[in-house]
Image: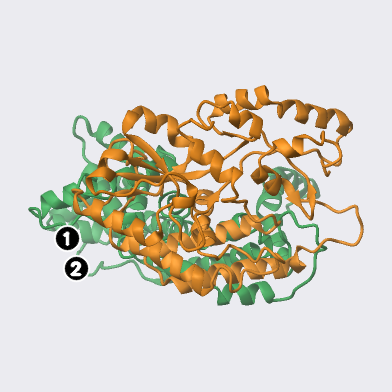
Chain colours: A green, B orange
Amino acid sequence: MAWGSSDSRAAGVLIAPALAGLILFIALPFVLAVGMSFTNLRLGSPLPLEFTGLRQYARVFADVSVQRAFLNNAVFALVVVPVQTALALLLALALNRRVRGMVVLRALFFLPVIFPMSLVAVVWILILAPGPEGMMNSLLSLLSFGHWQPRDFLHDAMWALPAIMLTSIWQGVGFQMVVLLAGLQAIPAQLYEAAAVDGAARWRQFRHVTLPQLRNPLIFVVVVTTILSFRVFDQVRIMTRGGPNDATTTAIFETVRSAFDRAQLAKAAAIAVVFFVVVLLLTLMQKRLLRQQPAPGISGTTERPSDATC
Amino acid sequence: MPLDELLPGELGDDLLPSILAQGTWQGRLYSVASFDSGLGIYAARDKLVEVSARIPKGPSDAWTAAEFEQILQALAARDADGAVLDLKLNYPDEWLTYGFSPVLQSAGADLVDRSTYRSASGVLNGAKARAAMEQVQGWFAHGFVDPNVDDAAFASGRVALSWVGHWMYGPYREALGENLVVVPLPDFGIGMRTGQGSWSWGVTRACRDPEAASQFLAFLLQRDEVLAMADANGAVPATRSAIAHSTLYGPNGPLHLFARQLLEGYAVPRPRTPAYPVVSAAFAQAFRDIRHGEGVQRALDRATMLIDRDIADNHGYALPETSSLHVP
């Protein structure tokens, strides 16, 4: 009863701009996409709009390229999320020192995040150039003492997806690194001092102080990287156009291809709806799994770290 | 709107047959152009002489596909990395359709059935199309084709042959000088074929003064105007009178081959159907899959399915009964 009606009116006014934005740019397009996916809507067609029921969904599920796209997305996420998170953590640990010039190093590792993906993709096309003169080929040849056979990575069914993954990790790792770096710097120094007094060496400090304390930033990084890795598009469009033979196609790439190469807006909408449901389920599942776990590994130390606030 | 009655009659005799074919839909002329395009193979003459390859004089004595493959083999045997052919694989999708649908057409196949424009079945995925595309796949499998990531394969001397359009004459001439020779694309069975077409102009139904618009178009199609445009962009002039006076494309010009291809009926216009964007995207994807070693029949079947489905989804792109139709 403490809330007067004027207060709730003020609250309503205050959230209105944000709510309007959400409705206009997120909810409405999504509702429209769901609606479109049950029709035969096409780009630039003079034909009348027809309700076609689940036909677009039947097509989406029967389309081998779309199946491959979701598989590629899953493989991409399964590799990129752990590798990129681990790499970001390593970088953050390495750069979390008070040494002169550290700011420059941090900036260097963060730089690729600022580059537009299209630029990164073009640079990596050159790095991955075929033939022995290609940078990646000559590096691998050097490292293998000349045993490496030069290959055309982006046109090789086995190497194209790993090449896209490498590009994406290189571009994205800086962002995760910064998040984890901030997390590391928020850990109170007393915890390490107490652990050291208790006789914990560096590795045990890392396992029983650093990791539990980083729990929240890590969860954030994992969830965001998962969502981002399902949204892969730019590098695919520029580097491989989904090929060779669908080896690198992704859900978003198939959506764009349907809508703009084939004018099939309704089918594109159906792919987008399926994609949304998949990502939503994955995110919910991930949050659930990550939240229900107790703070890991605190039995070995006498110092119990203060619980993360999740 | 149709231009047949708006443009002066003698223009129809002067315009290249390829331009008329490109601009005609359902029997009426809707667009005209002041320049056209064409495909050819640019070659380094000395390298062809080294392997004693015959140098074709015109479109009628183009290399056969088998002859072309022998030349590729002979050239590859003398080449450091065995890649001797540039197909401009660095170009975007529309190039693949423009540049390589003539392979189908020269084999007696096509992108769609042009008698009805209702289907690609049996045309794009028939035995003739498969045989021709399998030959192309063979060039990739043998490593004859340079991926041309840097767009410098031919100009830098890395390959002996470049399969591309008229627009590369300038840079290639600069790089190779007198050593440059232009020959027609190979013949896959029924005579060589080339792509054609470029920007073209029409008058919309909403135009307030169609008379004035078509007078302007007629002005642009005068000999000197066409020549001025061709000089500016290097394309094939779109009228017979302009070609006769062109230093590049005229009877004694180095690029007369491109003019002959258009004048003598070797050019195939893009399919004139609203399904074209889908046709082109489907074929380009099939070409890329074939490049990457996918089964040719499977790749062509898939493209055919995509095209047929698009046409069916649009009720055959049939003309509505009323005349107030929306012409795409």
Residue A55 against residue A298 in the figure, above or below: below
Task: Specify the amino acid type for callout 1.
Answer: Arg
Say which quadrant the C terminus of chain A sits in.
bottom left
- Picture quarter containing residue B73? bottom left
- Return the residue at label 1: A204
Location of residue A286 by image quarter: bottom left
Residue lying furthest right in this view?
A: B322
Q: Residues within 10 Å of mark 2 (few under 14, many from 20)?
A: few
| Pointer 2 residue | A300
Q: Secondary structure at mark 1?
A: helix
Residues at badges 1 and 2 in contact (C-beta under 8 Å)? yes
Residue B177 percent coordinates (x, y):
33, 28
Q: Quadrant of residue B71?
A: bottom left
Q: Position of residue B14 (x, y in %)?
A: 70, 35
Q: Residue at x 48, y 30 (%)?
A: B253
C-alpha span from label 1 to label 2 = 9 Å
Chain ID of residue with mark 2: A
Residue B307 horizontal/vertical position (percent): 62, 66
Viewer can see residue A188: no
Circle 1 chain: A
What amino acid type is highlighted by mark number 2?
Answer: Gly
- Please state which of residues B63 and B90 is positioned toward the viewer in this rendering: B63
Q: Is residue B44 left or right of residue A279?
A: left
Q: Could you tell me which residue is drawn at 71 percent across and 29 percent down?
A: B221
Q: Horizontal and vertical percent for residue A65?
A: 50, 69
**Residue B328 seen:** yes
In the image, farthest residue toward the left = A145
Image height check: is B76 above or below A99? below
SS under mark 2 = loop
Nearest the viewer among A218 and A246 is A246
Q: Earlier in the sequence, mark 1 or mark 2?
A: 1
Give the left or right position of residue B100, taking residue A203 as reference: right
